[in-house]
Every structure is written in C-alpha cells, then in structure tokens.
Image (tube, coloured by chain):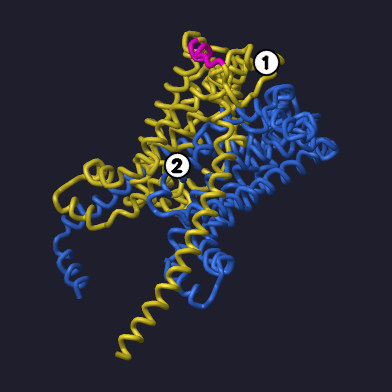
C-alpha cells in the first residue's frame, strides 16, 4: 500500500517535472523557429529579389511601384539573354573552363594525395604541409606576378597567354589543387592499412590499389572535392577580370558585370536574370548533393 | 623475436634482399612521379609567383630595380600617401568586423538549428547555406541592385515606414557598412555549418550533467559548448580572416573602392594600380601587405594542427 502511494507520488512528481521540461523545450523550439525565420529572411532576400526583378520588364523596373512585387510577370529577360549569342558564349566559356579545371585538379590531386598519404618518399611529409600552406595564399596575391610572367612569356616566345579563356585552365588550379589535395590526403589517410595490405597480398600494384580500393572507398571524399573544385572555378571573378578582356573570351561572372553594365546604364532586369542563371549550376549541384557539399566544406578544417 | 628470425632468414638469401631493396626504391620513385604534377603546379604557379611579387615590389614602373641606397622606392611612396593608410585602416576594419559578425551570426544560428528536432534540421540548414553557394560575384550584383541610388528596394520600405532615405553606397560610412554587410551575408553560412558540425560533436551527457548541476542555457553555452568548440571556432575564424582580408569580388562590384577610395581594400587597390594604372610593381607591393596576416595565420594554424596531432 505504502509502496503503491510512494510510486504513485513519484510517478506524479515525475510527470509534473517532465511536463515542465517539455514545456521549456517547446518554448525553446518556438524561439528557435522565430529567430531562424529572421535569419532565413536575411539570407534569402537577395536571391528572392533577384528572381522578382528577373520577371519584370524594364518599364516596370523603372516605375514607382512596389519593388517587392511583380505586377506583370514576363519571361522576356530570360528569352533575351538565352537567344543572345553573347550570354551563351559566356556560359560556354565558364562551362568548358570549369569542367577542364575539375578534371585536371582531380587527376593531379588524387594521384598526389595517394602518394603523400600512403607511399612515403623523401620530403613527402614536408610537402603535405607545404601544400596546405599554399592553400592559404590567396589569388589576390598571385594575379599580379602571374600577369607579369605571362606578359614576359609573350615577349620571349610569342605565345599570347593573356586574353584567352583557356588560360584560366592553367590559372584556376592554383586555387583548387592545394585544397583538393589536402582534403584527399585526409580521406585517404582514414582508410585502414589492412585494406591495402590485403590488396598487396593479392598481388595488386600501386595503380590497381588506387583504382580498385582507394578511389571506390574514398568516393564520398572525391565527390566532395569535385564539387568544391567546380564551385571555385565557376565562381572565380578575379582571374578572368584580370586576364581576359575581349567580350568573347569572358566567363560568366565577369561577362555579366562588364557587358550588361554599359557606363552608367544598368539593364537591371537582364543583370538579375543573368546572375540568377549563372548561380543556377552551383545551386542545382548543391540541391542534389547537399551532404557531399557540406562534407567538403567541413573536411577542410576538421581533417587538419 | 620475429625480427631476429626475419633478419636471419634474409641474410643468406642475398638476391631476395636486393629485390626488396629495389622494390622499396621503386615505390618511392613511383610515389614521387605521382606527386610530380602537384609539385610542378605548386612550384610554378604558386611559389614562384609569390617570390616574384617580392622581386616586383622592388622595381619601378618601367621594371628597373630601385637603387636600394636611396630612399625612393614603392614602399616609401606608399607610406607617404594618406590613401595607403586609409586602405590599411579600411582593410583591417573590414576584415575584423566582418569576421566577428560572421562568427556571431554563425554561432547563434547554429545553436538555433541544433535546437530543432533532427528531421527538420536538414531543411533549415539547406536554406541557410544558400548565400554561400551562390557565386559571390552574382549575389553581390543583387545587393548592388538592392542598394541602387534611385530604385533601392530598402529605401522603398524605409519610405513606407517613415524612416529617412539612406544613400547606401554614396555615403562613405554607409558604403563601409554595406561592404561589411554583404561580406557577412556571404560568409556566415560557412561559420554556421562549421559550428553546427562542432556542436553535434559535443556529447549530450555534458549538457545533462550541467543541467543536473542547475546550469541555465547561457551557462551551458558558455561553460560546455564554447570550450568544446574552441578548436573549430579558432580555425574557422582564422580561415575566414585570411579570405576576408584578401577579399576582392564584393568590394570590386559593390563600390569599386569608392566613394573617394574610402572602401578600397588591399586587393582592389592593388588591382586598380596594377591592371588599370599599369603600374605592376606598385600593385605587387600593395598586395604584399596581405602577406604578414597570412604568415601569422599560417603559424597559428600549423601550431594548432600539430598540437591536435600530438593529442591524437
């Protein structure tokens, strides 16, 4: 009897306490949602406004109506840009450059990361650290000497490197290779040694070990590095701005800024449409491969 | 024991030892060949230009070295210009303020996302990372349009709320605010993701223990989360400081350094001199001022990496 009362009392007390905890939790939850909505509004206003403007005609943009609403939605900006040869050229240049840079970078960094993570040679540890340090050197420090070097190469050999879109395929690996190698070293180092010993016993060579074991096992890491590499080469603004000038050699970000802004005349409808379409490839990749994207983002600092 | 046996076995079979030796040599040769493309890229396109820019900084506009015995060179020229000191001040202000706000917003937002039930987190995290995914050059154009002098959508809202109009990019102080704001907007999702990952690695038992000891939410954050996340907080802030210090896209598109050079940072000012002003050596000497912060950051990160290596 007494035990029963005690239990009942304990049960009751327990219920009350858990009730207050869950009420507290619910309040925390509501506040979290409230503040997160504020953050989301702050974070999503510019892209939304891009979208709103892209649906407006230039007459509506310069009218004194509510800028946050579209009264006469039109696709004319999209049609104008996508039938305009120039914009398609920018898109093509960006696409070719990014695909080439990604393939080149992944080839270089997977091979190098495999050799640095598994097949030690004289100075390989120093090299791994050195690769990480070069990742810290920004493009804003490198573009001036590179520009001068290219001008010098032109003077000496007659090979014109400036003002060609393909020169970006040489330049952009300076930004992507060190970081991708660094992530891949981390991923490869986390693969258990037993796996490659087993492969060695089965008579595999180093190339087989890489293609049959390391690449399949570290595939998430490779996808993450590929996405990073694509985003960097797609978004880079400084190198194309400094190294290319003719309208048919520009990549997307620079092309939009330099051709759609003529003097003080801003074709805002087209600029926003162009920027939105230019942001689409990274956004689509992100939408489908979000987990890999985030893995690549966090690997850089946590795998250190 | 096993060692001794192995050695004893290998002594008589001299041929086998030789192949083993050759094998080891071949392995390191293959390894070196595999790393060679990386070495070439890093040496030719990163290390060499980095040192070449030091050499460039010693030259005058027509690419002749300055006489080191006279006091006339790029650095004395820069030090004598008030604009240079303004750029130094603005770069430091820009980078430090932006990183502090990015870290704060990232830290706060990460806690809010972490509070949500696990199945809802993905959706919110996905939305909150979008500013980081859009190429900065593109999203800065959207901000430029939001700050437009005659059609600013913010000013439209202000007009309806009865707040006086703001000359966003026309006024030096507001222009400085705007470049920092856009940088914070672009960069805080990165902090959010890093801090969220760090928060997930804080064991739940620690929070329970703190709750039993009667800690409130602020004390839990201050005495449990903060110490546990210290490493990630430091590393992320350092990385971001480097990137923000050498920022180019946002300032270039948003203000192009104006009004009257008030928002120039090292990168945009160096670009101005080197590419438009055609004075490559002067541009190189300006961009070299980004190097000290890089060296400090590299030192700190390396120390951190090796310390973590020792703990593991």
Q: Residue at x 67, y 15 (%)?
A: A62
As helix, strand or loop, the secondary structure at mark 2 comes to helix
Numbered range of the magenta stretch: A72-79
As helix, strand or loop, the secondary structure at mark 1 comes to helix
Up the image or down, A73 lies above or below B106; here it is above
Badge 1 sits on which subunit? A
Q: Quadrant of the N terminus of chain B?
A: bottom left
Q: Quadrant of residue A69?
A: top right
Labels 1, 2: front one: 1
In the shown orientation, is residue A204 left or right of residue B301? left
Q: Residue at x 34, y 53 (%)?
A: A189
In the shown orientation, is residue B125 left or right of residue B273? left
Q: Which tint is chain A?
A: yellow
Mark number for residue A62?
A: 1
Q: Which tint is chain B?
A: blue
Badge 2 sits on which subunit? B
In the shown orientation, is residue A155 left or right of residue A94? right
Quickly name the residue at label 2. B126
Q: Nearer the viewer, residue B171 or A236?
A: B171
């Amino acid at each position: 009897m007494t035990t029963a009362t005690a239990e009942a009392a304990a049960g009751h007390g327990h219920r009350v306490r858990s009730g207050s905890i869950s009420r507290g939790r619910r309040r925390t939850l509501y506040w979290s949602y409230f503040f997160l909505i504020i953050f989301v509004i702050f974070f999503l206003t510019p892209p939304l406004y891009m979208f709103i403007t892209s649906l407006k005609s230039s007459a509506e943009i310069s009218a004194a109506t509510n800028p946050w609403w579209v009264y006469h939605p039109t696709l004319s900006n999209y049609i104008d840009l996508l039938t305009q040869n120039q914009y398609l050229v920018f898109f093509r240049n960006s696409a070719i450059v990014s695909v080439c840079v990604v393939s080149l970078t992944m080839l270089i960094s997977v091979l190098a990361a495999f050799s640095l993570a598994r097949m030690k040679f004289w100075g390989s540890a120093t090299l791994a650290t050195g690769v990480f340090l070069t990742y810290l050197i920004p493009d804003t420090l490198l573009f001036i000497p590179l520009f001068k070097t290219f001008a010098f190469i032109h003077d000496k050999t007659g090979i014109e490197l400036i003002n060609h879109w393909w020169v970006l395929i040489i330049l952009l690996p300076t930004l992507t290779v060190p970081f991708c190698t660094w992530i891949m070293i981390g991923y490869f180092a986390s693969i258990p040694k037993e796996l490659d010993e087993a492969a060695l016993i089965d008579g595999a060579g180093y190339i087989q070990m890489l293609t049959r074991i390391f690449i399949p096992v570290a595939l998430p890491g490779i996808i993450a590095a590929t996405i990073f590499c694509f985003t960097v080469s797609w978004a880079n603004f400084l190198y194309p701005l400094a190294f290319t000038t003719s309208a048919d050699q520009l990549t997307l970000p620079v092309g939009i800024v330099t051709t759609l802004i003529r003097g003080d005349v801003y074709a805002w409808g087209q600029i926003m449409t162009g920027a939105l379409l230019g942001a689409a490839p990274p956004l689509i990749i992100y939408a489908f491969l979000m987990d890999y994207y985030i893995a690549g983002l966090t690997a850089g600092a946590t795998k250190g | 024991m096993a060692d001794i046996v192995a050695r004893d076995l290998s002594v008589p079979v001299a041929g086998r030892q030789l192949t083993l030796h050759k094998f080891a040599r071949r392995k390191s040769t293959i390894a070196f060949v595999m790393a060679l493309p990386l070495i070439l890229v890093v040496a030719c396109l990163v290390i060499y230009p980095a040192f070449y820019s030091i050499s460039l900084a010693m030259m005058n506009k027509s690419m002749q070295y300055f006489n080191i015995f006279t006091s006339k060179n790029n650095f004395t020229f820069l030090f004598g210009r008030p604009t240079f000191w303004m750029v130094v001040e603005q770069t430091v202000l820009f980078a430090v303020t932006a990183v502090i706000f990015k870290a704060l917003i990232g830290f706060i937002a990460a806690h809010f996302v972490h509070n949500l039930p696990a199945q809802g987190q993905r959706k919110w995290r996905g939305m909150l990372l979008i500013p980081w995914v859009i190429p900065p050059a593109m999203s800065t154009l959207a901000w430029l349009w939001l700050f437009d002098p005659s059609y600013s959508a913010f000013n439209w809202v202000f007009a309806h709320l009865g707040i006086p109009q703001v000359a966003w990019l026309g006024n030096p102080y507001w222009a400085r605010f705007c470049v920092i704001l856009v940088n914070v907007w672009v960069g805080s999702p990165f902090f959010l993701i890093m801090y969220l990952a760090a928060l997930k690695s804080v064991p739940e038992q620690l929070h329970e223990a703190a709750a039993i000891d009667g800690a409130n939410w602020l004390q839990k954050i201050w005495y449990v989360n903060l110490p546990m996340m210290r490493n990630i907080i430091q590393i992320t802030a350092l990385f971001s400081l480097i990137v923000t210090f050498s920022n180019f896209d946002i300032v270039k598109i948003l203000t192009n350094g104006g009004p009257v050079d008030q928002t120039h940072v090292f990168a945009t000012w160096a670009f101005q001199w080197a590419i438009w002003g055609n004075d490559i050596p002067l541009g190189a000497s300006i961009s070299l001022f980004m190097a000290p912060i890089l060296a400090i950051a590299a030192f700190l990160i390396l120390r951190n990496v090796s310390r973590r290596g020792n703990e593991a």
